[in-house]
Image: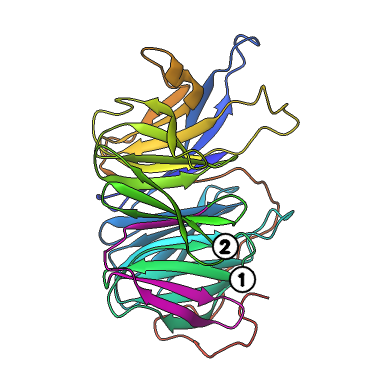
């Protein structure tokens, strides 16, 4: 498992999560540094990872790419005309290498890239104002976006065009699909709404004590959130109740949270619910959320970047495939329509 974190100080940090072979009866992990690059000219705003590929977006309007297997920086993409606000990879089921990278910006546009090599396929204007977040459906056929125009957008990734757009009357900061793609979640300040993916019907509403700043979908209907309460909360979206809560997980607000993949071959009952969190206090921690049952749970591993972290991403898949950047990655590159943008 590799983790990457971006910071206000324009650095991107890479870590490898490894088990410590001390006591075989206990699970002890360590975060080993992979790299740190001053990749952007200004603050890092978003990050994504899949297989050996990782990407960071910045307020300098660029997307920077990394090869996690080689712990190396690959270069940057210059197709946005505004701050990059959200990034997401799509990896087809059963594969260890992403097929596409989708990025959104503060101008309301989305760029769709092929990931082999990284070449711009299409730029689509989705919102009238900046996009706050985007989420790709597990099928890879569509993506949802939420923006500063208080609207929800749907992007057809096969055709490379906006297929749906509606006003929701409030500015959502986050949008996420569940692991199966049957539901999606939207975050507005402290409130989290759970929707049916088929018709966007609201099936549940959750409320955090303070503003939610990050979220990640888990298995069995769990949704993990972090925010200004400095805690990690696991919501059971089926019952609408809190399943686990690690209070004071950090000394400052939680800016990034990811669910770490299950260990191969582990029994479902024995496999820990591993979650990694990152805070603006500069610390990245790994937790078994079931430790919330203890009065004062301790993290399984942690690392201090000594920087103001803004985002967190992770990848558990390995691939020997070499990463490449295409020739049309400069600003104003080829954005001609492709009839099958993600095929």
Q: In the depicted view, which residue is nearer to us: 9 or 74?
A: 9
**Does residue 89 belong to the magenta stretch?**
no
Residue at the spot of label 2? 137
For the point 37% across and 56% down, which residue is it? 174
Give 54 or 241, whichever is nearer the viewer.
241
Residue depicted at x 36% and y 47%: 214
Res 238 seen here = yes
Task: Give the residue at the far bottom of this rendering.
Answer: 336
Q: Are marks 2 and 1 in contact (CB under 8 Å)?
A: yes
- Tell me the element at label 2: loop
Q: Is residue 181 left or right of residue 105?
A: right
Asked if 278 appears above or below 43 in the picture, the reply is above
Labelled disc at residue 70: none
Classify the position of the C terminus by image quarter. bottom right
Confirm whether the magenta stretch covers residue 153.
Answer: yes
Location of the N terminus (image quadrant): top right
SS for callout 1: loop
Q: Position of residue 319 (x, y in %)?
A: 69, 51
Q: Which mark identifies residue 141?
A: 1
- Count neighbours of disc 1 (C-alpha within 10 A) and say few if under 14, some if 14 to 19, many if 20 or more: some
Residue 275 to residue 321: above or below: above
Per the rendered image, the range of residues in magenta is: 150-177
Measured from the top left, where is residue 246 in percent x and y? Answer: 38, 25
Look at 37% across and 12% down and name the residue there.
Answer: 295
């Amino acid at each position: 498992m590799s983790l990457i974190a971006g910071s206000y100080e324009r650095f991107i940090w890479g870590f490898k999560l490894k088990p410590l072979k001390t006591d075989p009866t206990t699970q002890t992990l360590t975060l080993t540094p992979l790299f740190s690059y001053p990749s952007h000219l200004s603050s890092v705003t978003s990050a994504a990872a899949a297989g050996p590929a990782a990407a960071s977006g910045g307020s300098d309007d660029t997307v920077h790419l990394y090869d996690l297997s080689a712990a190396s920086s690959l270069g940057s993409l210059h197709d946005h005309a505004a701050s990059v606000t959200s990034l997401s990879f799509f990896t087809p089921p059963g594969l260890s290498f992403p097929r596409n990278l989708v990025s959104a910006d503060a101008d309301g546009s989305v760029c769709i890239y092929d990931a082999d090599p990284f070449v711009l396929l299409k730029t689509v204007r989705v919102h009238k104002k900046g996009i706050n977040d985007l989420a790709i459906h597990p099928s890879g056929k569509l993506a949802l976006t939420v923006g500063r125009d208080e609207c929800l957008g749907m992007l057809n990734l096969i055709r490379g065009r906006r297929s749906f757009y509606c006003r929701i009357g409030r500015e959502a900061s986050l949008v996420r699909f569940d692991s199966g793609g049957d539901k999606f979640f939207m975050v507005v300040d402290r409130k989290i709404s759970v929707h049916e993916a088929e018709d966007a019907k609201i099936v549940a509403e959750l409320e955090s004590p303070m503003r939610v700043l990050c979220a990640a979908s888990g298995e069995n209907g769990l949704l993990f959130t972090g925010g200004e309460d400095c805690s990690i909360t696991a919501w059971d979206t089926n019952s609408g109740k809190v399943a686990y809560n690690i209070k004071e997980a950090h000394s400052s607000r939680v800016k990034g949270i990811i669910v770490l993949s299950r260990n191969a071959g582990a029994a479902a009952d024995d496999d820990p619910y591993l979650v990694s969190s990152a805070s603006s206090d500069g610390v990245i921690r790994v937790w078994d959320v079931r430790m919330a049952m203890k009065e004062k749970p301790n993290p399984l591993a942690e690392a201090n970047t000594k920087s103001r972290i803004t985002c967190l991403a992770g990848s558990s898949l390995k691939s020997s495939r070499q990463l490449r950047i295409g020739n049309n990655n400069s600003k104003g590159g080829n954005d001609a329509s492709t009839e099958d943008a993600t095929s």
